[in-house]
Image (cartoon, helix red, strand yellow):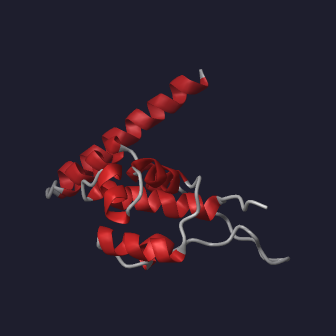
Amino acid sequence: MKKSTGSIDKEVGSRVRMRRMSIGMSQEKLGDMLGLTFQQVQKYEKGMNRISVARLIEITKILGVDVHFFLDGVTSTKSAPGFAEENPPTYVADMMSTPEGLQLVRHFAGIKNPKVRKSIVQLVSSVAAQDDTERSS
């Protein structure tokens, strides 16, 4: 019987994608270094295929991070009776897995003036609120 992937596989895959993109590496390059096709890397990143521990260790070495980068904060979706945790928001990983989100963070991090940074946050908040209003109309 084939095991299906779950939210943990998607989260770990998303973090692989985020790190790969942050260092400017293509799926093809990572695949070559792992001895895989870019399609297999794509499946890992989307959480369609489960990444084995051995493969994850290889990926950490190639991407220059500790294994904790991929696993910190990841929790099982199976909870013990009587204990319920809210799932942490995924918006950071979601944003960082897009080219636009990555560019935004890179450029924002380069802004040293705190007043300018605050103004940008206010601008983005205003645009997001306006977008929400337009979608609900």
Identify the residue at image location x=31%, y=53%.
21
Q: Residue 46's spot in the image, x, y percent?
A: 52, 51
Left or right: 34 as drawn, with respect to 118: right
Left or right: 89 as drawn, with respect to 17: right
Given residues 100 and 43, the one toward you in this image is: 43
Based on the displayed image, in which of its 4 quarters is residue 16 positioned?
A: bottom left
135 shown above or below 123: above
Based on the displayed image, in which of its 4 quarters is residue 110 positioned?
A: bottom left
Given residues 30 and 111, the one toward you in this image is: 30
Q: How many marks?
A: 0
Quarter of the image where the N terminus is located: bottom right
Q: Residue 99's spot in the image, x, y percent?
A: 33, 43
Q: Residue 118's spot in the image, x, y percent?
A: 27, 51
Identify the residue at image location x=37%, y=64%.
34
Identify the residue at image location x=35%, y=51%.
27
Identify the residue at image location x=20%, y=49%.
107
Residue pushed farthest front? 35
Given residues 53 and 87, the one toward you in this image is: 53
Left or right: 71 as drawn, with respect to 99: right
Q: Residue 123's spot in the image, x, y percent?
A: 32, 39
Q: In this rendering, does residue 30 appear at all?
A: yes
112 shown above or below 74: above
Q: In this rendering, does residue 88 appear at all?
A: no
